[in-house]
Amino acid sequence: MDRIRNAVTRARHTRDGVVQDAPKAAEAPAAVRPVRAAPEPEAAPAGQDPLNLPSVQCNVDSFGRNRIIANEQDPVLNAYRVLRTRALQKLDAEGWRTIAVVSPGSGAGKTVTAINLAIAISSKPGSRATLVDLDFYRPSVARYLGVQDAPSSLDFFEGKCTARDVAVRPGLSDVVLVANERVTRRGAEHLTSPKADELIDTAIHDFGSRVVIFDMSPLLGCDDTLAFLPKVDCALLVAASGDTRVEDLKEAKRILGKTNILGTVLNKAPAAFMPNQYY
């Protein structure tokens, strides 16, 4: 009996061992293939443009004459900082990225406003601004900045090059410039073409612009701006104190009836009319 009892006990132990060992084999973790982390993007070397766009020189000496912000001590800087902050707040609230700077007629200062707004926005960290001259009747951005021999946006619209080929860095904070010094009477055709959409897409996605600012032809007298307005998020209307007629301003607002209005800038206002002169 003792031999039989011992044999049964050994068999039970062997059986139990198999039962106990099986789960351990099943629970053994499977081999895991190591996953390599994605490499961090390389930072651009010091002094090199991360967008790899060519640089151009501005004639800073002419900025004062053309009423362009030249430095931190410029007396007009604070006014454009206020405009910048109010514009960015509205843009962020609405999810807007593109602004057409317009005026009823010539001489209101829309080009100066477009340039200074781009400089003010780009001086805020992380707020790259792309400034595009689409005034095909009187292109002035390059002249006001004193930039010579810059590529022309018309070369892109005429299919001679890509959108990237007409973009440069003018050395103004974090501004990308698409200039133009040529005149055309086919502006409306260009501005309603797929090329216009491509230019906007490149400025926003390839250049990483927080805001794209378009200096447009005056609203009255040609149809260029009217043709382009459906492609932008909003318009900034510029009027000049003592120059813009009330009738023209009303007509401009009528034309902008279906366009989001970012705001209205009163240019050339007498200093005595400006609030907070202490600042």
Image: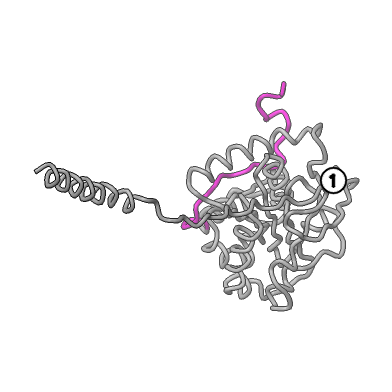
Residue most extreme to the bottom: 159
Magenta segment boundaries in residue numbering: 256-279
Residue most extreme to the right: 61
Identify which residue, 265 or 19, lies in the foreground: 19
Disc 1 is placed on an element classified as: loop
Residue 80, horizontal then vertical, whole percent? 69, 38
Q: Residue at x 71, y 24 (%)?
A: 279
Q: Is residue 56 above or below residue 10?
A: below
Is residue 265 highlighted in magenta?
yes
Residue 33, horizontal then vertical, whole percent? 50, 57
Answer whether residue 103 is visible to the viewer in this image: no
Q: Residue at x 71, y 33 (%)?
A: 78
Q: Is residue 75 above or below residue 122?
A: above
Label 1 Cα crowd, 10 Å radius (few <14 / some 14-19 / many 20+): some
Is residue 260 found left or right of 50 in the rendered image? left
Q: Which of the 4 image quarters holds residue 73?
A: top right
| Total numbered labels | 1
Residue 110, horizontal then vertical, whole percent? 69, 51
Answer whether residue 143 is visible to the viewer in this image: yes
Is residue 166 found left or right of 189 in the rendered image? right
Identify which residue, 158 or 254, lies in the foreground: 158
Residue most extreme to the top: 278
Q: Which of the 4 image quarters holds residue 121?
A: top right
Is residue 177 highlighted in magenta?
no
Looking at the rendering, in which quadrant would you find the N terminus? top left
Identify which residue, 83 or 156, lies in the foreground: 156
Is residue 26 found left or right of 164 in the rendered image? left
Residue 77, horizontal then vertical, whole percent? 74, 36
Is residue 230 found left or right of 224 in the rendered image? left
Question: Residue under circle 1?
Answer: 63
